[in-house]
Amino acid sequence: MAVALKGKIREGRGKGANRRLRDEGFLPAVVYGGKANVSFTVNPKELKKLIEKEGLNSLIELAIEGDSEKKRVVVIKDHQQHPVRDGWEHADFLEVNMKQEIKVDVPVVLVGHSPGEKLGGMVEQNLHTVEVKCLPGEIPESFKVDMTQVELDQVVHISDLDVPDNIEILDHLSESVVSVHEVKVVEEAPAEEELVEGAEEGEEEGATAEKAEDKDKGESAEAEKK
């Protein structure tokens, strides 16, 4: 079931106009996939609340003030993260036909802890999303990996995920999703103090050698005089 979100048609274009909109508390956005692209704004706080409650791939019933369509069923297709602050700079929505399959990225969620962690193993998640193709109403909220069943030196591949028959995986099934492996101990480099001491010893030895060489030269010169 789609969740409701309101928006408003925006007239301005370009970085300057979008910056002013963000300063006023609006998030610039665009919806495409229908007859024509529509530029609009949404309340970022409302969008964030919707995502936290329903998930990033939830179906949204979008009502844009000033739009030729009363409502559009959309999904969030992409977004631009602010380079410094927490939050989005722009959002892309895809208008969907409930009878046509679409491509989306489904999050991978790790649940629980691996027994290998107690043995000193380190968990390495290699994939955070998996690309799938399915009908809009059948998009999974996430793919969960039960980490309590993942042992030390074990690798979980896409092919090991619990995927419904109506979902087509577009990534390679052999790709690694998560692994638990033993941490290799790296030999420590010499401490800074040891390096300094070694350098000082080398300097002292060099200075001593120079003094001895100068002494030999002096003695040789005296012998020649005699």
Image (tube, rainbow, N blue to C red):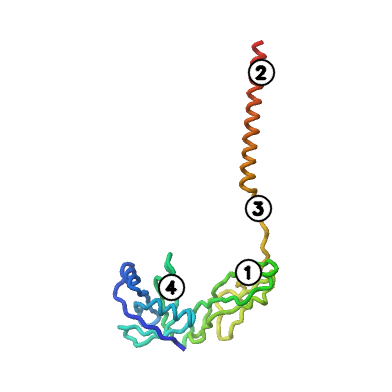
Name the N-terminal-most of marks 4 and 1: 4
Q: Which label is found at residue 79?
A: 4
Image disc number at residue 188: 3
Q: CA distance from mark 2 to mark 3?
A: 48 Å
Mark 1 lies on residue = 123
Mark found first going from the N terminus, 2 or 4? 4
> Which amino acid does the dot numbered 2 rest on?
Glu
In this view, the mark in front (4 or 3): 3
Disc with the residue nearer the chain's start (2 vs 3): 3
Q: Amino acid at mark 3?
A: Glu
Question: Please, what secondary structure does the residue beneath circle 1 have?
Answer: strand
Image coordinates for residue 126, horizontal then vertical, percent: 58, 69
Q: Quadrant of the C terminus?
A: top right
Which residue appears at 61% of the width and 77% of the height?
111
Q: Amino acid at mark 4?
A: His
Between the C-alphas of marks 3 and 1, the distance is 23 Å
Secondary structure under the numbered disc 3 in the rendered image: loop
Of the numbered discs 4 and 3, the one sitting upstream in the chain is 4
x and y percentages locating residue 6 in the rendered image: 37, 83
> Count the marks: how many?
4
Which residue is at 44% across, 81% downward?
50
Residue visible at 64% across and 70% down in the picture: 179
Position of 226 with respect to 100 (left or right) is: right
Tell me what residue is drawn at x 62 percent, y 76 percent: 112
The answer to whether one can see residue 20 in this image is yes
Amino acid type assigned to the residue bearing label 1 in the image: Val
Q: Residues within 10 Å of mark 1 (few under 14, many from 20)?
A: many
Contact, CB < 8 Å: mark 4 with mark 1?
no
Name the residue beneath numbered marker 2.
219
| Mark 3 or mark 1, earlier in chain | 1
Task: Characterize the local packing of mark 4: few (<14), some (14-19) or many (20 or more) Cα atoms within 10 angstroms.
Answer: few
Q: Is residue 102 visible?
A: no
